Each structure stands twice: as structure tokens, then as C-alpha cells.
Image (cartoon, helix red, strand yellow):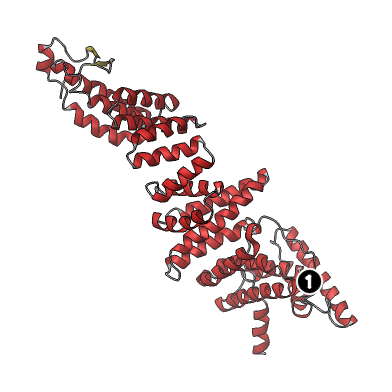
Amino acid sequence: MKRKIFIGLLIFAAGLFVAPAAFSQEEESDDQDDGLCENRYGATAEDSAQCVMNISLYREFYKQWKKDDYNNNIVKDAVKPWRWVFLNCPCGTQNTYIDGANILGKYLIENAKTPEEKNAYIDTLMMLYDQRIKYFNKEGYVLGRKGVDLYKFRTKDYDKAFEYFKRSVELEGNKSSGAVLVYYFRTAIKMATSNKMDSTVIVETYDQISDIIDHNLKKASPRNKAIWENIKGNIEVTFEPFATCEDLVSIYSKKFEENPDDVELLKKITEMLDKKKCNDTELFFETSIKLYDLEPSPVAAFMIGKMLINKQDYNKAIEYLQEATALEGNEEKADAYYYMAFCYQTLKNFSKARQMARKAIEENPEKGIAYILIGDLYAASSNECASDDIMKKSVYWIAVDYYYKAKKMDPTVSEMADERIRSYSKYFPTKEELFFHDYEDGDTYTVGCWINETTTVRSAK
């Protein structure tokens, strides 16, 4: 009797709940057995009759349960005939396994009364997937579902789930389900963080699945594209805290050596290295230049310009950044102009630096860092514009004006602006100096020299 109870539980030890979003489409069975069964419904006419009868019986109850979004109790009436079919007609219909996963996952596992009973059902679910592969093949597809269910119902077995996902993706390739890719990546991270695998598994898995995601994004319909974009976002957010520059360079250097003229690969490498702030690496330099040679574009020119800034080759950076000003978005153009302003500032060409900073502001009036750059240019001109004491110190008035503008237009630079305001306000002339030159607080003053802007007279506090 005890043995019968154990076998009964083992048969039902399945049922990983598959959330609606986990797989994009409801499964449909074509009931092809790929020649893996000698007799689809059994060896005798009596066997066939029993199989057909029990399949029909459980399916009627199952359909009513499914129609009610798996919420009514009629599923209880489906269990007994379904179990008979599972044990006696393994080749009868693939629906036995598709429906069985739901019967086990959405009903039996969720309603298990003890941990032992629940574990038995999960074991049976794993066996159900194995038997489905045995009689109906589709190994890659089924292993993906098996892995998702194992991970959801028994997270501690993430290492087994990882192997299922890995094999599934190897077999399915670009046909892999989005849910499988998401869970595959999660388990890869667990393998690394638990020291069961080297941390490079995270980067390698990311690289593998991102290729698949990009492939599906390219050919997706508008509706499916939104789904794949969501999956890509999920993966990228999960990936963000991991992968060092060293890891990325190690992985992508090999790919670059193997396919140096692959434009899509070059775009992927440069975007990833830039996003992870690895743009001071030699790989970023080489791939950016190669991408520009193969497919000149404002985007590639922008990448190279920033890289040349890191190399302190400012004159050459300006050439590329000038081309990058053809970028489509206003924010992107503003960035290109700002970096040009920075280059000219470093080269001590203050007038040209201001011109580029103003262009950045024209494109994006909220670019606070551009206002700060202009303020810095003015503050650095005190000795250059020093015909008298007031003239020398007036540049700090106009510099501080720009720091206040920066704060107003872009709160993210407030701390930087406040630090400069405190620092340079100390150099304002005293009341005595203002009196001596016949000025007082609140007067209007035009700063000459190369600056030629009007400001307000203020004394040091």
C-alpha cells in the first residue's frame, strides 16, 4: 500500500507553474511521435479504446478548467483519467504532457499539503518533461520549459536548471524563448556568485543571449518587438552590476580578432564598452577606429572623439567631434559640442571654447555643465583681463552668474556650481575698492576684454 502511495505521488511530482508572460504563445500539439513509438495507443484494440476514451474524458474536464482560467475545481475530475493516459498511453498525444504540466503546476503543486508531497509532485514534473522528450523529441524546447519550472519551484537546484537552459539555448539558438533567456542569465549569475563557476560565465552568457535577442528584435513584428525590448531591458539591468572592463575586454577581444570586419559586432563592442565606462581601453580604441573606417557615421565619430580626449589628443578629437555634431538628437549634438568646448578649453583657446559651449546650450538649454565650463573660462581670465583691480575681479562676477545659471537649468550640477560660487565669491572686490572706483552694489558693469558681457556689481561678503 505504501509503495502504491509513493508511486502515485511520484507520477504527480511535476507541475511547475508557468506564468502567462513566461512563454509568448500557448502550446499546440501536432501529435507527431517522430516514429519513437511502435503503437501510438497500445498493442491491442482494447488498449486503443481505453486510451482514446481516457484522453477524451480528461480533455473535456481540462478544457472547462482552462476556459475558466484554471480557477475552478473541475480539474479534480481530469486528474484520474489524465494519470491513466500518462501511465498507459505515453505516445497517445503530446497534449498529455502539455496539459499535465498545467495540472501538476497550477493545481497539484500549489495545493500540496506537505513539503514531501510538493517535492514528489515536482519530481514527477521533471519526469514528465523527460518522457515528453523521449516520445516526442523537441529536446531544446522542452528543456527550456523544464528549466523554468525547476528554477521557479525549487530554486536551490539552480545549477541543474542552468544546465537545462544551456543545452536548450544550444539546441534552439535564435528560436529560444525569451523566458528561457531571462532565467538562463539569472542562473548563470547564481553559478558565478556561488563560486560554482568563474565570473566570466556571466559575460559569456550575456554575449550569447544578447545575440539571440538582437536577432529577434530585427525580425519582430511591432507587438513582439515591444516584448523583446522588455526582455533586453531585463537582461541589461541584471547584467549592469557585474562584468568588469577586464572581463569585457577578454571576451570581446577574441570576437574582434575572429571577425574584425563585422560591423554589427563592432557596434555591439563599442556600445558595451562605452556603457560600462571602459572607453579608455585599447580595445575600445581599435574597434572604434575600425567601425569608423568600415561605416563612417556621426555616432562612430563621437565614440572616437571621446576616446581621443582620454588619450589627450585634443586637436584630433576636435576633428571627429565636429563630424559628430551631425548626430540627430539635440542632446547628442549638445554632447558633441560640449566635448569640443572642453578640448578648446584645454588648448587654452577660450574664445572658441565658449563658442562651442554656447552651441551646446543652443541644442540643450538644460546642459548645466556647459554653463559651468563658460564660468570656468571667465574665472581663468582674471589675469588676462587685468587693466585695473576692478576689471581683474569683475570676471568673477560674470563667472558666478554662469554658475547660478547652471544650477537653475540643471539641478544635477548644483553641488559643483555651489562649490565654485563659494570659491570665487571670495575674490569679489571689497566695498572700499568699489567706492574708490565709484561703484556700489547693484550697479551694472560690462566686462570687457574678450568676454564682453554685462553683469551686476557685488562686493565680497
Q: Is residue 446 above or below residue 106?
A: above
Residue 396 point in image, percent of width and height: 21, 23
Residue found farthest to the top: 438
Q: Nearer the viewer, residue 200 or 75?
A: 200
Residue 7, quarter of the rendered image: bottom right
Determine which residue is flagged by label 1.
34
Residue 89 point in image, percent of width and height: 79, 77
Residue 376 point in image, percent of width and height: 27, 28
- Residue 256 left/right relative to 219: left
Residue 152 point in image, percent of width and height: 56, 66
Residue 460, quarter of the rendered image: top left
Q: Is residue 369 above or below residue 440?
A: below
- Residue 135 left/right relative to 161: right
Q: What is the secondary structure assignment of the residue under circle 1?
A: loop
Three-letter residue code for mark 1: Asp
Q: Residue at x 42, y 46 (%)?
A: 285
Q: Residue at x 85, y 73 (%)?
A: 52
Q: Nearer the viewer, residue 308 or 425?
A: 308
- Dot 1 alpha-carbon crowd within 10 angstroms: few under 14, some 14 to 19, many 20 or more: few
